[in-house]
Image (cartoon, helix red, strand yellow):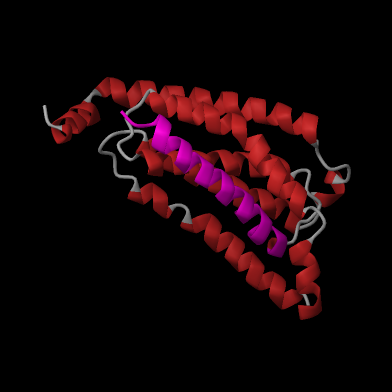
């Protein structure tokens, strides 16, 4: 049987539609629980969270990270299935990009230029760059394990999607600790941390998701 024929067979196999989706859901749940425990042990929620919730910038961070997590998981669910169209799911990534982009523009309008650099640098950059990848380890591992039981035909792309989704989950948790709420900080440091995990996922996917 040629590879193309095998992919078509797997794509129409009804068991491949149910089992991998269920396994992915369980993997995401397990990874998120472990990530939450790691986050609680490492950092915990910021002490002024009640006050911060009444601002605009703090809750907005969650809008961006949760939207990114949903888009990333949608992409994972497509890429783990052979022959599935993943491009529509990839287009969902435009939503968090537009949200943070609009927020950055608005921030630069309402904040004088002299205040841009302090908000970009913030006070938690190094913590952000280490915490998000660390918290993302469990969800990334769980998602990759689930994808190994499916049949991804683009292992690097699938691994990158797993890394992106895991990093977005980690960023959502980290956002509740981080006191740098400016979109200027988020767009730089969160993005770098998420990119690192995405790259790690692509590398791991290239080795673990081949079949």
Residue drawn 18% across and 27% down?
9
Residue 7 rendering spot, x and y as whole percentages = 21, 32
Within the image, what quadrant is residue 176 found in? top right
Residue 36 rendering spot, x and y as whole percentages = 69, 30
User: In terms of depth relative to the viewer, which is nearer, 148 or 60?
Assistant: 148
Can the viewer see residue 73 in this picture? no
143 in relation to 161, above or below: above
**In the image, is residue 162 part of the stretch drawn in magenta?**
no
* 165 left or right, relative to 18: right
Residue 97 rendering spot, x and y as whole percentages = 54, 59
Magenta residue span: 184-211
* 94 left or right, relative to 1: right
**In the image, is residue 204 part of the stretch drawn in magenta?**
yes
Q: How many marks?
A: 0
Kindly give the residue lying farthest to the left in the view shown. Answer: 1
* 148 left or right, relative to 1: right
Residue 200 rendering spot, x and y as whole percentages = 52, 42
Within the image, what quadrant is residue 152 found in? top left
Q: What secondary structure do most residues of the magenta stretch adopt?
A: helix
């Amino acid at each position: 049987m040629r590879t193309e024929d095998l992919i078509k067979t797997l794509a129409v196999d009804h068991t491949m539609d149910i089992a991998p989706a269920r396994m992915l859901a369980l993997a995401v749940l397990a990874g998120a629980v472990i990530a939450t425990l790691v986050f609680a042990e490492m950092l915990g929620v910021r002490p002024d969270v009640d006050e911060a919730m009444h601002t605009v910038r703090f809750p907005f961070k969650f809008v961006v990270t949760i939207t990114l997590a949903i888009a990333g998981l949608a992409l994972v669910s497509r890429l783990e299935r052979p022959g599935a169209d993943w491009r529509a799911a990839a287009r969902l990534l435009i939503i968090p990009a537009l949200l943070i982009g609009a927020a950055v523009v608005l921030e630069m309008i309402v904040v004088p230029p002299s205040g841009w650099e302090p908000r970009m640098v913030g006070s938690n950059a190094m913590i952000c760059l280490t915490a998000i990848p660390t918290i993302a380890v469990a969800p990334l591992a769980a998602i990759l394990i689930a994808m190994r039981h499916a049949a991804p035909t683009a292992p690097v792309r699938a691994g990158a999607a797993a890394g992106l989704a895991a990093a977005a989950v980690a960023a959502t948790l980290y956002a509740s600790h981080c006191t740098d709420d400016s979109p200027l900080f988020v767009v730089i440091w969160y993005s770098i941390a998420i990119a690192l995990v995405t790259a790690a996922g692509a590398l791991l996917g290239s080795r673990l998701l081949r079949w």
